[in-house]
């Protein structure tokens, strides 16, 4: 295979469109232009393939976000980067967040795929909590954690709503309200 990432790209597109149970190993091989045997030589089964896709997705997602503790990074800009990463997924590809799709199936996923999916959510919450604590320094760690949950639920829900309704503008409305809530929170903290 000339492009080892092609298999992962094709599998990622399938998962982001239909979830883990919405595609077959054979479909990925066909769409990638390889035989099932060649796909299996790289990833012995569907769960190995999905685990590799999820692991790569987590790594790439956090590369985009950057370091939440970077003293040169403005926390407001980091929050905007977070919102933009989700908006781009829905606006540019009309696809859900990969781990958002997998998260909906978490109870029935093969264990290695579930572990990677949970890792995504755990890292998101940790990243957001750190950023929010910098954004509102007088907030308690528990308050920052609560806001992190709210942000993640808002952007994931906004993506789901926008995709379900077929209107990406819905995500913008949800994101604008999130920004307004965060600004009010910061103003209350600074008052």
Image: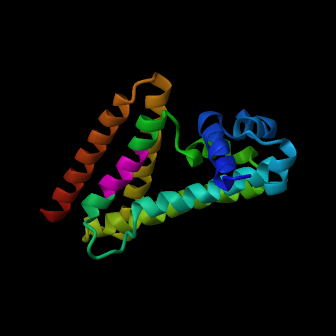
Q: Main secondary structure of the magenta part?
A: helix
Seen from this angle, which residue lies furthest front?
Answer: 2
Vertical comparison of 71 with 33: above or below: below
Question: Where residue 185 appears, x then y in whole percent?
Answer: 23, 55
Whether residue 149 appears in magenta in the rendering, the answer is: no
> Residue reaching furthest right?
37
Inspect the magenta stretch and tell me whether residue 84 lies in it: yes
Q: In this view, does 112 lie above or below 175?
A: below
The quadrant of the picture occupied by the C terminus is: bottom left
The picture quadrant where one finds residue 144 is: bottom left
The image quarter containing residue 155 is top left
Q: How many marks?
A: 0
Report whether residue 134 is seen: yes
The residue shown at (78%, 42%) is 34
Q: Residue at x 80, y 48 (%)?
A: 39
Question: Left or right: where does residue 98 sit relative to residue 22?
Answer: left
Residue 37 percent location from the top left of the image: 87, 47
The stretch in magenta equals: 79-86
Residue plotted at (78% across, 51% down): 47
Position of 108 compared to 159: left or right?
Answer: right
Seen from the viewer's position, the closer of residues 182 and 24 is 24
| Residue 157 rendering spot, x and y as whole percentages | 46, 39
Identify which residue, 11 or 176, lies in the foreground.
11
Q: Which colour scheme is used?
A: rainbow
Q: In this view, does 9 lie to the left or right of 177?
A: right
Say whether residue 104 is visible: no
User: Residue 162, how many percent across, how many down?
Assistant: 43, 30
The extreme bottom residue here reads 71
């Amino acid at each position: 295979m000339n492009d080892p990432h092609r298999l992962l790209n094709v599998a990622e597109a399938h998962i982001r469109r239909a979830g883990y149970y919405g595609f077959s190993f054979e479909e990925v091989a066909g769409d990638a232009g390889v035989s099932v045997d060649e796909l299996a030589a790289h990833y012995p089964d569907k769960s190995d393939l999905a685990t590799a896709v999820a692991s790569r997705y987590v790594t790439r997602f956090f590369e985009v976000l950057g370091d939440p503790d970077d003293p040169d990074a403005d926390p407001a800009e980091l929050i905007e980067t977070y919102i933009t990463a989700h908006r781009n997924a829905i606006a540019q590809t009309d696809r859900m967040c990969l781990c958002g799709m997998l998260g909906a199936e978490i109870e029935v996923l093969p264990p290695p795929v579930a572990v990677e999916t949970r890792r995504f959510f755990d890292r998101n919450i940790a990243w957001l909590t750190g950023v929010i604590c910098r954004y509102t320094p007088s907030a308690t760690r528990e308050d920052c954690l609560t806001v992190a949950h709210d942000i993640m639920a808002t952007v994931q829900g906004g993506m789901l709503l926008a995709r379900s309704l077929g209107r990406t503008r819905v995500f913008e409305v949800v994101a604008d309200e999130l920004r307004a809530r965060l600004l009010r929170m910061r103003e209350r903290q600074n008052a």
